[in-house]
Image (tube, rainbow, N blue to C red):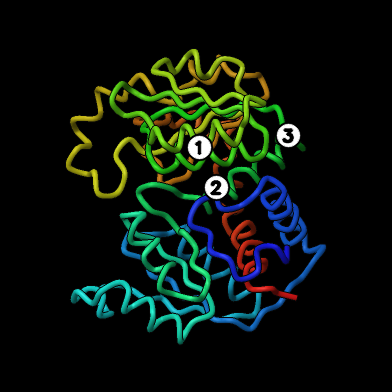
Amino acid sequence: MAALLGRDLLSLADISPTELQELLQLATQLKSQQLKLQCNKVLGLLFSKASTRTRVSFTVAMYQLGGQVIDLNPNVTQVSRGEPLQDTARVLDRYLDILAIRTFAQQDLETFAHYAKIPVINALTDAEHPCQVLADLLTIQESFNTLAGLTLTYVGDGNNMANSLMLGCALVGMNVRIATPSGYEPDSKIVEQARAIANNKTEVLVTHDPELAAKGSAVLYTDVWASMGQEAEADNRMPIFQPYQISEQLLSLAQPEAIVLHCLPAHRGEEITEAVIEGSQSRVWEQAENRLHAQKALLASILGAK
């Protein structure tokens, strides 16, 4: 994975299909302990949004690689007092080896990456969540022993998960269908970007019909109906999104061997039913574990672990 050495990951579109496949292969080797890598580096976590899986998985991954982690909570740094992002970026650049940022605006992430010479990883923005999709693809590959030609259906809000899933699926040769209510579609620029990557070899479909999208799919995927920062809209969204719930009925339209994914946290009874998330076709907990292995592979590749 020398090709990723020292590079940023701000979007899944930053890497090639070959690089993505190699990352997944490395994650598999690290998970099975066929390969053990070490790097004595320091990772900074600058998270403006709450986090469980991203924070813990990045921390454990770095410790397992032999490195150190500094949790840069904005509330106890000068960021909370208005220090310009470019100033913070140039200071952290002199202390850290790599920085993972979880924030609201994609532009803030890009500002950090512009001013910091060290690699910067998108640990989630309102636009994209690339590290989650690395784990998602690893989970799908484990379930089907392949990715190419499969169909993933995402139902719900056309948010950062929908955006990154379109890019990730296009890169690995999967069909992707995004079913959202009218007015909640994914970013049109990312739709076109994903279609350009797919190059008419696979499908990138955006629809308002969840049943059409689910029919014959190998993977059903959902996320909360109101993301962080949208809590005030949650009650208004509830009736709009109700038809987009992953229920037993919707799952019955997919392939018999289909799996169900959710990036968590989940609101049972809203975007997914209790029976589905706890059912035999759920791979949600394997998916959550794979955040660790996928991000370890990413850190090892960018930092040149040996």
Q: Which mark is residue 144?
A: 3
- Cα gap from disc 3 to disc 1, whole angstroms: 26 Å
Residue 119 lies, in percent from the top left, at 53, 70
Q: Is residue 65 above or below residue 203?
A: below
Q: Is residue 118 above or below residue 124?
A: below
Question: Marks 2 and 1: CB-CB under 8 Å?
Answer: yes
Nearer to us in this view, 17 or 58: 17
Query: Between disc 2 and disc 3, whose residue precedes?
Result: 2
Q: Amino acid at mark 3?
A: Phe
Q: Quadrant of the N terminus?
A: bottom right
Q: Residues within 10 Å of mark 2 (few under 14, many from 20)?
A: some
- Cα gap from disc 2 to disc 3, whole angstroms: 24 Å
Q: Which mark is residue 275?
A: none
Local secondary structure at mark 3:
helix
Nearer to us in this view, 116 or 49: 116
Q: Amino acid at mark 1?
A: Gln
Question: Which residue position is annotated with label 1?
Answer: 193
Query: Between disc 3 and disc 1, whose residue precedes?
Result: 3
Q: Residues within 10 Å of mark 3 (few under 14, many from 20)?
A: few
Total numbered badges shown on the rendered structure:
3
In the image: residue 218, left or right of residue 240: right
Question: Which residue position is annotated with label 2?
Answer: 13
Q: Amino acid at mark 2?
A: Ala
